[in-house]
Image: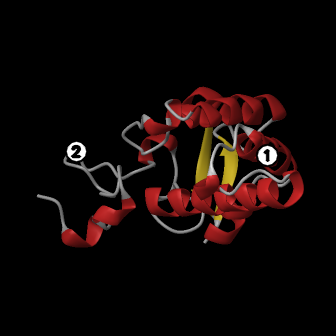
Amino acid sequence: MVDRKDMGSWLDGPGAVTRDQTGEYVGQRLGLPRTGPGSLGRFGRRLAALGLDWVACQLIAIGLFRVPRPWGGQQGFTPLAIFAVENLVLLSVAGATLGHRVMGLQLVALRGGRASVPQVLARTVLLCLAIPALIWDRDGRGGHDKVANTALLSTR
């Protein structure tokens, strides 16, 4: 039986239950703490960070490149290209995008320390393809993080 205090909200998405029937909590197999700084970032916070990043990229595309508004017609790949560049630059330099920073998340390599440029590149390409990011493991990590051997951790 799962104790209610060990459960997250259904809004937290896949992996929301912090303890499963085997007694493992999300991130335990990776050697991460259950909650707090250094724990695996939950789905709701990751989704909010993605939304913030996407809105920022849309605004840049509209403001700098005169891309039509999302509700006004075809916009091509300009916002996606901006999103890819944002991820490549900010994750390589700071370990977090604007959305990650606002939501209290940080990208790290599972071996420890900051993710390398090749890891960030692989993660970004797969994230932009969308499908790998929509496939999660038991810990709630997307395929893009599994391939890149990275994890998005909570900083608070």
At label 1, counting other C-alpha atoms closer than 10 Å, the crowd grade (few under 14, some 14-19, many 20 or more) is: some
Foreground label between 2 and 1: 1
Q: Looking at the picture, which amino acid does disc 2 mark?
A: Thr
Q: SS for tag 2? A: loop
Q: Identify the coloring.
A: secondary structure
At label 2, counting other C-alpha atoms closer than 10 Å, the crowd grade (few under 14, some 14-19, many 20 or more) is: few
Disc 2: which residue: 22
Report x, y in % for residue 89: 86, 46
Q: Quadrant of residue 94?
A: bottom right
Q: Is residue 9 left or right of residue 122?
A: left
Report x, y in % for residue 25: 35, 53
Q: Disc 2, disc 1: CB below 8 Å? A: no
Instruction: Identify the residue at horizontal 28%, vertical 63% (top origin).
Output: 10
Instruction: Identify the residue at horizontal 68%, vertical 30% (top origin).
Output: 125
Report x, y in % for residue 151: 60, 45
Report x, y in % for residue 139: 41, 44
Instruction: Identify the residue at horizontal 79%, vertical 53% (top origin).
Output: 61
Between residue 30 and residue 61, name the one nearer to us.
Answer: 61
Instruction: Identify the residue at horizontal 80%, vertical 36% (top origin).
Output: 116
Q: SS for tag 1? A: helix
Disc 1: which residue: 82
Q: Is residue 87 left or right of residue 146?
A: right
Disc on the earlier residue, 2 or 1: 2
Between residue 62 and residue 147, name the one nearer to us.
Answer: 62
